[in-house]
Image: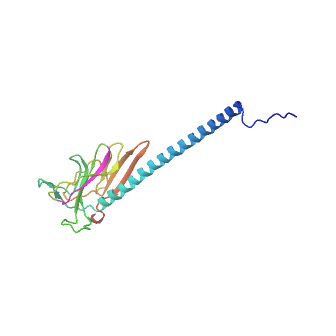
Amino acid sequence: MNEEPTPNGFTLVEMLVALALFAVIAVGALGLLRFSVDAELASRAKTDSIAAQRRFLSVWTADLAQAVPRPSRDQSGTPRPAFEANTDGMVIRFTRSGWDNLDGAARPGLQKVEYRITATALVRAGYPFPDGAAADSPSEVLPLTAPATVRFRTRDGNWRDRWEPQLTTELPIAVELLIPQRGVPPLRIVSLVGVNYQ
């Protein structure tokens, strides 16, 4: 009685078929993983963009709502109107109230602020004093893909591309800011100016 031993392994053909099936499954799993990572990165970028726009909107609207009809003086002592726009490379410059003094520093409750456009962002700079002071270092408040445009609503109810006040204490009723965005219409922000002083 001579029994033939039963094979305890796989043949070469069976191994090649198993490896081919494993490779197909691995390629599919890798594609799914890549898709998931790309979707997560795109979602994070969009969320960061929305968060940056909301932070900017909060600062922008608060600044404009607290604008006061107070003229100021620059470093050389030259009188400046209460609200300036599109001069000296800046978008807008004005004096606002409501500057909290949490540390009790020797400074007024009014703050002169300005917004400028750089190559990549809209930046905000504050002045330590409304008169005779240089601006502090600007901080980026909103990344930009292209320059933003601004318009002004005057007391006669019309929108104007340029701010040309008749009085040095005159404020616009509202400011419209158009922020270009890739692949979608521009973001339009309309903010009231000096809500308590109109």
- Say left or right for 135 vs 177: left
Q: Position of residue 125 (x, y in %)?
A: 25, 54
Q: Residue at x 23, y 61 (%)?
A: 111
At 30% from the left and 42% from the top, the residue drawn is 119
Chain part drawn in magenta: 120-130
In magenta stretch: residue 164: no
Q: Give the farthest residue toward the right.
A: 1
Q: How many marks?
A: 0
**Depth check, front residue: 196 or 46:** 46
Up-down: is 2 above or below 159?
Answer: above
Figure quadrant of the C terminus: bottom left
Answer above or below: position of 58 versus 25: below
In the image shown, does 169 or 76 lie closer to the viewer?
A: 76
Q: State whether residue 105 is above or below residue 75.
A: below
24 horizontally vs 160: left or right: right
Q: How is the image coloured?
A: rainbow
Extreme front residue here? 1
- Residue at the spot x=11%, y=53% of the render? 76
User: Viewed as shown, does residue 43 lie left or right of 112?
Assistant: right
Which quadrant, please, contains the N terminus?
Answer: top right
> Residue 183, position in %: x, y?
44, 42
Q: Give how far across and how far down residue 20 sits, in percent.
A: 65, 34
| Residue 20 in the image: above or below residue 139 | above
Q: Position of residue 193 (x, y in %)?
A: 30, 59
Q: Nearer the viewer, residue 34 or 73?
A: 34
Residue ranking furthest to the top: 13
Q: Is residue 129 magenta?
A: yes
